[in-house]
Image (cartoon, rainbow, N blue to C red):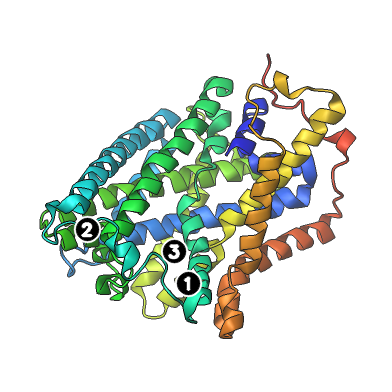
Amino acid sequence: MTSLGEMATFIPVAGSFTVYASRFVDRSLGFAMGWIYWFSWSITFALELVAAGLIIQYWDSSLNIGIFIAIFWAIFTAVNFLPIRWFGAFEMWFASIKVVTIIGFIIFAICIDAGAGQNGYLGFHAWQNPGPFAEYITTGDSGKFVGFWSVLVTAGFSYQGAELVGIGAGETHDPARSVPKAIRWTFWGIVSLFVATIFFIGLLVPSDTPDLSIGTTDASASPLVIAANLAGVPVLPHIINAVLLTAVLSAANSNVYSGSRILVGLASENNAPAFLTRTNKHGTPYLAVAVTSAIGLLAFLNESQNGGDVFTWLLNITAIAGFITWSCISICHLRFMNALKARGIPRKELPYAAPLQPYLTWFGLFFCVLILLTNGFTVFIEWSTSGFFAAYVSLILFVVLFVGHKLIFWTKPVKLADVDLDRDRVKQ
């Protein structure tokens, strides 16, 4: 986030990091990165529509999720055709509900852990029996490590979206002030709310709880709902389920927005058809919104007998797209800092200077690449061809897009002296 924030405050532009990849590093990198990121968000939009239907089925399993896919698809497509302020208003209310609920859950968790629930005082009992780390595939300490490392991709997918603070910079009033503020709020929000929630779930829900592995597709498998059920508070699961619904709907709204702006960024760098940059009188790129939203209709694949398998494979492509994007953002930032140095622009003149640079960027790049390369390591312990492609199809597709674009257009890496730091730059 800080790496992207530094570039986004200096050059606030729609499409953000896909534009930086084309201008700072290589047009082929911008092409491959942008398209796989767009596909990730557009497919995730379909995923959120399905998730919304499944959450509602918690109250009535006889309802067909296709009804809710259609309703919510129409609502969020319409919202994203409106002026950007309407998108912001929706997100403000959705975010407020989530923050209040998370704070409420943390207070609830403290009370239950201290002995207010039907199971009495819990403390750190779950960390002792069965323990904080569950064994996976093998036993002992190696099994616990395999279990820990195998869930990193899932955990990373949950944090995907933090980079949205940079995507919206091109439509933000005074990005030099608003983007750094958004970065700080996002960082402290993740630390204080997300991490705290995970910490307390670990205290309230032991890793061997049967409800965690019953394989249900509705919201009853949510650790938040399970924690409320274990505490013996019958009404709380319904409240949590309702809030989970707002969280999913908020994500769906963001998916269409971010995907459409990525398309605009791709088109502005000649990596997508130029008509995608067309806007209405409110400045909304309506054609990019329409194309992104149309992919959400793939959610209806879950209504057919074999369509669910196709949809699952499409989701596999999105699984590590976030890590690919974060790796490329780090590469762009390293190139950006080198270009500043070559142009004689001191970092103190930047509207926002990321801390601990370049060490923090190198740190992020190293671990993102490490997780990318090892995310499917379990298939080598117990070989599975389908598991291998599920784990690495995103990386394979990224390489195909990059190499294919380079072979067709014969692009060359941008020379340091040719890095464009002036176009769209904030005037100071």
Residue 416, percent across and down? 87, 37
Helix, strand or loop at mark 2: loop
- Residue at the spot of label 3: 298
For discs 2 and 3, the disc positioned in front in the rendered view: 2
Q: Vertically, is 353 above or below 191?
A: above
Question: Is residue 52 visible to the viewer in this orientation of the structure?
Answer: no
The residue at 28%/66% (across/down) is 221
Judging by the rendered image, the residue that carries numbered circle 1 is: 144
Foreground mark, 1 or 3, reads 1
Amino acid type indicated by mark 2: Leu
Q: Is 301 rendered above or below residue 36?
A: below
Judge the density around disc 2: few (<14), some (14-19), many (≥20) Cα neighbours within 10 Å.
Answer: some
Please report whichever mark, 1 or 2, sits nearer to the chain's N-terminal start.
2
Task: Inspect the image, locate mark 3, and give the three-letter code of the amino acid beneath it.
Answer: Leu
Q: Residues within 10 Å of mark 3 (few under 14, many from 20)?
A: many
Closer-to-camera residue (251/222): 222
Q: Which quadrant of the figure has residue 175?
A: top right
What number is the disc on residue 112? none
Furthest residue toward top? 428
Q: Residue at 49% across / 31% down in the picture?
A: 184
> Which residue is painted at 35% across and 31% down in the image?
89
User: For numbered disc 3, what is the local secondary structure?
Assistant: helix
Residue 322 x, y percent position in the rendering = 56, 54
Name the quarter where the C terminus is drawn.
top right
Residue 141: tell me if it is visible. yes
The numbered mark, 2 or 3, whose residue comes first in the sequence reads: 2
Residue on which disc 2 sits: 122
Apparent side of residue 176 relative to residue 256 in the rendered image (left or right): right
